[in-house]
Image (spheres, rainbow, N blue to C red):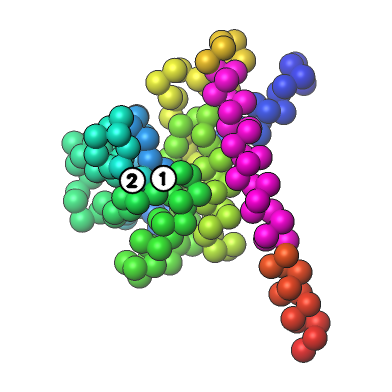
Amino acid sequence: MVNPFDCITEFIFVETAVSPADVILVPGANHPPLMEKAADLYKQGMAPYVLPSSGYKSHVEMTEWEYLRNLALENGIPEEAILKEDKAQHTLENARFSLEVLHRNNIVPRKAIVVCKAGHARRSLLCYQAEFPKDCEFMVSHCVDRYGITKENWFLTDVGINRVMNEVKKIGTYFGDIIPKSNIMHQLKQKGKSEK
């Protein structure tokens, strides 16, 4: 370990190899490189569908889904390959509502690629893992955000430190609620099995 905070770097900046999947998931943002990355993966044949997800944001003056869909079309993804989720307001809803969209389209996700900003990778992955079936395999392919934040440089600027530590805080907020609920459900299921 070179820096005492290297564990934060390894935790936040998740990236995996990608292989063919059922869908490419894009948690919303008004950041063109997200859809450029998704389009590149789509054109490589990595998945038959791309599912951008996010609702209306005043700074975009439309839903982030619509913004990303327009970019998808500009980047050569055909309209019929773009699924629609335009209600989510945060990353857990991106995951939850995306799964509902997949179910409505009779798509059972066994493998999925999450395309997100580098500093948002762990939170995105955890949210999709929390909401999707436990047997769904996730891969993460990220892009650099508009601040240029990477795992190699996040700790060198105030904006990098603030954004990464905000991700750590948000993960604690999200999963501080989710973990106890998932443990209770697991315990209830185990209790039900033992009583049979």
Q: Residue 109 vs residue 63: left or right?
A: right
Counting from the top left corner in percent of width and height, residue 79 is at: 19, 51
Q: Residue 55 carries which label?
A: 2
As drawn, is 28 to the left or to the right of 163?
left
- Whole-percent x, y for residue 60 in the image: 28, 32
Q: What element carries label 1?
A: loop
Q: What stretch is highlighted in magenta?
A: 160-183
Label 1 neighbour load within 10 Å: few <14, some 14-19, many 20+? some
Q: Few, some or many C-alpha atoms within 10 Å of disc 2 (few <14, some 14-19, many ≥20)?
A: many
Count of numbered marks: 2
Closer to the camera, 46 or 80?
80
Is residue 26 at all visible to an observer of this figure?
no
At a point 50% along the width and 20% down the height, the residue shown is 149
Residue drawn at x 71%, y 23% as measured from the top left? 6
Mark drawn on residue 110: none
Q: Can residue 176 be found in the magenta stretch?
A: yes
Q: In the rendered image, which quarter is residue 195 located in? A: bottom right
Q: Say which amino acid is labelled 1.
A: Gln
Q: Quick one: 113 or 43, which is closer to the camera?
A: 113
List the residue tagged with mark 1.
Answer: 89
Residue at coordinates 55% horizontally, 18% vertically from top-left? 160
Kindly tell me whether residue 98 is visible in this rendering. yes
| Place of residue 38 in the rendered image (x, y in percent of width and height, measured from the top left) | 35, 40
Instruction: Kindly check if marks 2 and 1 are in contact, taking CB atoms under 8 A apart as contact.
Output: yes
Disc 2 from disc 1: Cα separation = 6 Å
